C-alpha cells in the first residue's frame, strides 16, 4: 500500500488571512534531505502541498523535481502566488492544482485575503487551464460563507474547476466556527448545486449513507508539518504526546502509525460505537477536548436525522481526494 502524504513545506506566506491555521510566531522549512528521508522510509504515492505558500521555500524547485523524478503524484494549494511564480516546466510536474477562493465575489474575497487576490487567483486558474491541468477551487467552509456554497459551486462551474471544501477547524480562533445548523445547511446547498466527486468528511459520509465512514487520517494518510512533525491530520493538536519527527522515520518506517496520535485518530469513542457517525472527525473532537465523544455535528446524538440528497459525479484523479477529510464536487 502507498500513502497519500500531506505536507506543509513551509508556513511562510505572502498573505495574513484571519481564518488561517498556520503558526506565525516563526517561519520554518522542511529541507530537501527530509523530503528524501520521507520517500526512502515510506511508500509515498502522492503528496499534497499546503499550509503556507510553498514556493516561498528556498528549495521548492529542487523538492518538486525530486518528487516528480520518483513518480510521486503532486498537488499544491495556493493563493495564486505560487502558481503564477513557478516556471512552465515546474507547473507541468503537478497532477492537479488548487486555488483558494472562499467567496463568490471579488469584494468578499479581497476583504478576507487582501486587495487584488480575486484577480490573481483568476489569472492563476487561466494559466493552469492553458497548461492543460486539472484545477480545483479550495474553499474553507465557515460561519461567514456557509450560506454561499451553492454560489461557490456556480463559480467553480463558470471557471471550469472542481470545488473542494474543507470544514473550518478552530485551531487558532472560534471566530469562523460553524454552528450545527450552519454545517448541515452548507452541505445541503453544496449537494443541491453540484455532483459529488468524493467525500471523506466522516460525518457527512455517514449522512450520505455511504459505507466506511472512517477518516483517512491515521489510516492511509500521513501529515508532515513545517517543523517536521508527523501527525495524522494538519489540525491535530500537538499537546499531549511528543510526536515523531522526520528524523525518526529511517528507523521506524510505517510503524510511525502506531504513535498515540494515530491510534487516537483511529479509535471509535465508546459513546459512538453504535452510532452511524462512528465518532466522526477525530481532529475536531481532539481540538474541542472531546476525543471520547461524538462529533459536534452528529445529528444522531441529538436524536435527529439529516436529509442529504446527493448525486455522484464521474470519478476524477485528484490527489487531495485521498489524503484529507474533504469534499469535492463537480
Image: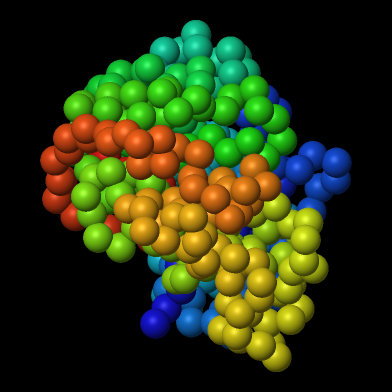
Q: In this view, does 249 lie to the left or right of 274?
A: right
Residue 26, image x, y percentages: 85, 45
Q: Which residue is drawn at 17% across and 38% down?
A: 310
Q: Residue at x 85, y 41 (%)?
A: 25
- Residue 113: quadrant of the picture: top right
Query: Is the N terminus in the top left, top right, bottom left or bottom right quadrant?
Result: bottom left
- Residue 165: quadrant of the picture: top left
> 100 or 64: which is nearer to us?
100
Q: Residue at x 48, y 82 (%)?
A: 43
Asked if one can make out residue 135 in the rendered structure from this viewpoint, the answer is no
Q: Which residue is drawn at 30% across and 19% down?
A: 151
Asked if one can make out residue 187 in the rendered structure from this viewpoint, the answer is yes
Residue 94, image x, y percentages: 42, 57
What sort of colour scheme is used for the picture? rainbow
Query: Is the C terminus in the top left, top right, bottom left or bottom right quadrant?
Result: top left
Label total for image: 0
Residue 170 to residue 76: above or below: above
Residue 295, image x, y percentages: 49, 45
Residue 143 to residue 234: above or below: above
Residue 63, image x, y percentages: 61, 65
Residue 236 to residue 100: above or below: below
Amino acid at each position: 500500500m502507498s500513502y497519500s502524504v500531506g505536507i506543509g513545506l513551509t508556513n511562510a506566506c505572502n498573505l495574513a488571512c484571519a481564518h488561517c491555521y498556520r503558526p506565525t510566531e516563526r517561519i520554518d522549512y522542511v529541507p530537501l534531505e527530509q523530503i528524501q528521508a520521507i520517500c526512502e522510509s515510506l511508500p509515498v504515492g502522492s503528496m499534497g502541498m499546503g499550509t503556507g505558500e510553498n514556493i516561498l521555500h528556498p528549495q521548492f524547485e529542487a523538492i518538486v523535481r525530486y518528487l516528480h523524478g520518483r513518480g510521486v503524484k503532486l498537488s499544491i494549494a495556493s493563493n495564486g502566488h505560487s502558481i503564477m511564480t513557478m516556471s512552465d516546466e515546474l507547473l507541468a510536474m503537478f497532477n492537479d492544482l488548487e486555488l483558494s477562493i472562499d467567496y463568490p465575489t471579488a469584494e468578499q474575497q479581497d476583504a478576507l485575503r487582501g486587495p487584488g487576490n480575486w484577480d490573481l487567483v483568476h489569472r492563476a486558474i487561466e494559466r493552469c487551464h492553458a497548461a492543460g491541468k486539472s484545477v480545483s477551487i479550495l474553499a474553507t467552509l465557515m460561519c461567514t460563507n456557509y450560506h454561499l456554497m451553492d454560489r461557490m459551486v456556480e463559480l467553480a462551474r463558470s471557471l471550469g474547476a472542481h470545488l473542494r471544501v474543507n470544514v473550518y477547524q478552530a485551531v487558532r480562533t472560534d471566530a469562523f466556527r460553524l454552528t450545527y445548523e450552519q454545517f448541515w445547511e452548507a452541505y445541503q446547498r453544496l449537494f443541491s448545486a453540484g455532483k459529488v466527486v468524493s467525500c471523506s468528511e466522516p460525518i457527512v459520509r455517514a449522512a450520505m449513507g455511504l459505507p466506511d465512514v472512517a477518516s483517512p487520517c491515521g489510516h492511509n494518510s500521513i501529515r508532515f508539518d513545517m517543523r517536521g512533525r508527523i501527525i495524522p491530520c494538519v489540525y491535530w493538536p500537538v499537546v499531549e504526546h511528543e510526536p515523531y519527527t522526520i528524523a525518526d522515520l529511517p528507523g521506524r518506517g510505517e510503524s510511525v502509525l502506531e504513535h498515540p496520535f494515530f491510534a487516537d485518530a483511529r479509535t471509535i469513542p465508546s459513546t459512538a460505537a453504535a452510532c452511524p457517525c462512528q465518532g466522526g472527525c477525530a481532529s475536531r473532537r481532539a481540538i474541542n477536548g472531546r476525543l471520547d465523544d461524538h462529533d459536534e455535528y452528529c445529528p444522531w446524538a441529538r436524536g435527529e436525522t439529516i436529509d442529504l440528497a446527493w448525486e455522484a459525479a464521474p470519478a476524477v484523479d485528484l490527489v487531495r481526494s485521498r489524503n484529507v477529510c474533504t469534499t469535492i464536487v463537480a
